[in-house]
Image (spheres, rainbow, N blue to C red):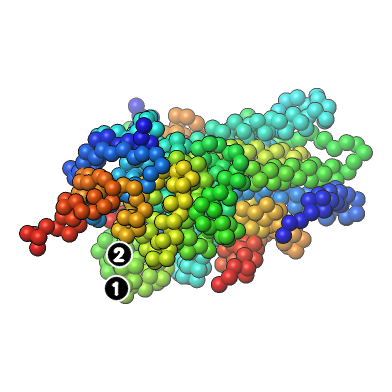
Amino acid sequence: MDLIAQTLADGLVLGGIYALAAVGFSLIFGVLHVINLSHGILVLLGAYLALLFSEALHIDPLLCIPAVMAVLFCIGYGYQRFLIQHAVDRASVNSMLLTFGVALMLQNVMIWLFSPDMKSITPSYAFNSFKIGPVNFDAVRVSALIASLILLSLLAAFLRYSPMGRVIRATAQQTMAARLCGVNVRHVYALTFAVSAAFAGAAGIVIGIILPFSPNDEGTWTLNAFVVVVLGGVGSPAGALIGGLLLGLVSTLTAQYIGPAFPNVTMFLLLVLLLLVRPHGLLGNAFAPSR
Amino acid sequence: MSLLEVRGLSKNFRGLAAIGDVSFAIAEGSITSIIGPNGAGKSTLFNLITGYLAPSAGEVRFKDRRITGLATNRIAELGVARAFQIARPFRELSVFDNVRIGALFGKAGPRDVEATTRRALELASIAHLATQPASALTVGQLRHLEVARAIATRADLLLADEPCAGLNPTETAAMIDVLRQVRRNGVTVVLVEHDMPSVMEVSDRLLVLDAGRLIADGPPPVVANDPKVIAAYLGTPDAA
Amino acid sequence: MKQNPKLIAAVVVLAIVLLAAGPAFLPPFYVRVGQLMLYSAGLGLAWAILGGFAGYASFGHSAFIGIGAFAAGLVENQYSSLPPTLLLPLGLVTGALCCAILSAVIAYPILRLRGTFFAIAMLGVSHVGAELTNNIDFFQGALGLNFPPLAPAAMDPAVFYYELFLGGALLILLISWLIRRSRFGAGLFSIREDEDTARMLGVPTERYKRVAFVVSAVLTGLMGVIYAHSLGYITTDSVYRDDTNLSLIVYSLLGGMGTLFGPVIGAGLLVFITQVILGRLLDFHLFATGLLLVLLILIAPGGVNGLLHRKRRPA
């Protein structure tokens, strides 16, 4: 009984982090209709940047979040505006291929700069934990979860209440109409990508403090994000949260009861099953016309 | 035995009767036109016959065999071909290769593929375009391609969905000629059309739909003078 | 323009003879480059049966390289007492069989997905395959698998594997050519162009897609078996690779998607660039492949063939 509670709790904690790691991908898919296969590498970029900053400046990795987000914001804007935009045409496979290519390039660069060995970021409170009832909570994971939830809420608020958020949502729902209203769609796309990249980077930091990482993981994080989107729906932080929590639960339950080798297999089977049965996820497309 | 029989066919969309209790029989070797005001349900009727939609009631029989509820490709295999108003050619393939797909996979199986393909191209008057990529064709030519591909499947029945829509008079006349040639070669034709002069000229029989119901059924001169038909199109003097 | 079939046959035979005799004249480095070119050409051709002909672009075909290689390796290690002339066929058959069975099973759900979803799902297959191979001890993916040396004593192993790759590539080329000329091939092309219309015209789309998928998987697996032998020792990362996943697509993009020789041209070009030109920068293969793809997408979305077509078509 305790084991199940622990496994479920672990799953929820992990799930919140998966949600943050997927929300950027979800936004790009929903607004730009691009499947960003370089998502995973952007997440890792965030992790490595945080590693550098926190070691150089001797500060807590979570405090690096603003700086890392800023860096990734700029990179994301340029990437979309000057590279991906040019590749986007009716064949969505083109943008997928381009982002896949960039992912490989960046992966190689990171292997060269940082070596393919696993690294991790160890905050000062690394080995603390506390108990609530029968369930053990690891301090690092909990702070990672809290950071994730805060960031997700900020994004949700931004999309819902800020003027720019409204513009992004409008552009996602009816691109042509948005253009006719004077919206500079290229700029909006680039901005959306920039925001997504920033959140991917933040996710990288959060992941970096709880799991070891290496440039070779980039594919896993992209696929994870895809599963979260398929599970929970496209384009909304809420969808990402639901998808993430589900994925987290499936991961820990599989690891505990089937075997530690199998979480990704289950995730993949779940992906295929959902693509066949309900490809739009539980919350559907946040930008689809409402009935 | 009629080639195609429709009995008591109805289709409801959430309370709206798109097709209400329609019955008719199509004789082999004839050209029948289904006409009616916009929204009368003509395309829905085609969709019901070819299996795109399942009827709410009634049945469709082809060669005295029940085809209601069968999958579209199964119905196609039995010998019912459809030429669409919005043509869907295989863009990167040549015209010849497009039609050849029909011959290769059509009803009677892949015999005499080359001969069947050439025949279909001739009947549709596009033999001269055989080597062109389908993407290079005009709208009118694409309609001919649709027909050619459909008859290459050696179908017995061709359902042509507004083949003359958007064509100029010359192209329309060419299209009507093709349908006549097709009939001369043993394919029964049912078409949905709005172009009245052509319809009157080429059809053996007219079926008039209005608001989902069959309001007239007979040879063109009779149907054209039917007061119900005139009312459906133009309204009655009192309503003016 | 009708060409003399006898002339074409003569040219083909001559080409094969020249290719087979190549190692006699080339320095060892170029023999290895030749191996890689032939291996890549074979893989590209196999991928194209599904991706180029039927239009189902798989982003995870290295899964079948891995399945074939590990299946062969495990079975050959089990029966290592057999002579080499029996071991290689055993490995090939086992690899092919495993690829056939697994692909046939996966085909049912995965071919119901289209376009980008199919691509990502295949990427998932590749990653899952890699993970299972790595984490389950039976597969020895993490530990590594040794392959028995098979080259006859009198022959330089590099040349031996060159000829094997040549044989494999020629076989796949032949199969590709036969498919293109057949009713099956015509059906695949129609599926690529417009799957729903093809179905309406009577093409058995589901069955054809599955056949193409399995054929593509088996041929890829066969090349994978030969590749694993040529390496002598493999780990998970030797065969389940994202850059391979990408390269297979790039070959067709570069040489002409859906054409017979496109993957061959593309493979030749890409291997030439990465091995000969960038050969010294060994650690930058991922980078080079990625960069080439990026440039390709930005400049010529139709591949080299696409560039040619654009010039020929009237404005």
Near mark 1 (Cα within 10 A), the count class, few <14, some 14-19 or many ≥20, is: few
Which quadrant is the N terminus of chain B positioned in? Answer: top left
| Discs 2 and 1 carry the same chain letter | yes
Q: Residue at x 71, y 50 (%)?
A: C41
| Residue C295 figure quarter | bottom right
Q: In 3D space, how far apart are the residues under numbered discs 2 and 1 (Cα atoms)?
A: 10 Å
What's the residue type where badge 2 is placed? Answer: Ala
- Give the SS element for disc 2: helix
Q: Which residue is mark 2?
A: A170
| Residue C209 figure quarter | top right
Q: In this image, C9 relative to C137: left or right?
A: right
Question: Pointers 2 and 1 in contact (CB under 8 A)?
Answer: yes
| Residue B52 figure quarter | top left
- Foreground mark, 2 or 1, reads 1
Residue, far front: B221
In the picture, the disc for residue C257 is none
Chain for mark 1?
A
Residue, far left: B238
The x, y position of residue C75, in whole percent, is 71, 28
What's the residue type where badge 1 is placed? Answer: Cys
Q: Which residue is mark 1?
A: A181
Q: Earlier in the sequence, mark 2 or mark 1?
A: 2
| C147, C178: nearer the viewer | C178
Near mark 2 (Cα within 10 A), the count class, few <14, some 14-19 or many ≥20, is: some
Q: In this image, C165 relative to C299: left or right?
A: right
| B7, A105: nearer the viewer | B7
Chain for mark 2?
A
The x, y position of residue A126, in whole percent, is 45, 48
- Give the SS element for disc 1: loop
| A85, A112: nearer the viewer | A85
Q: Residue at x 36, y 35 (%)?
A: B2
| C270, C113: nearer the viewer | C113
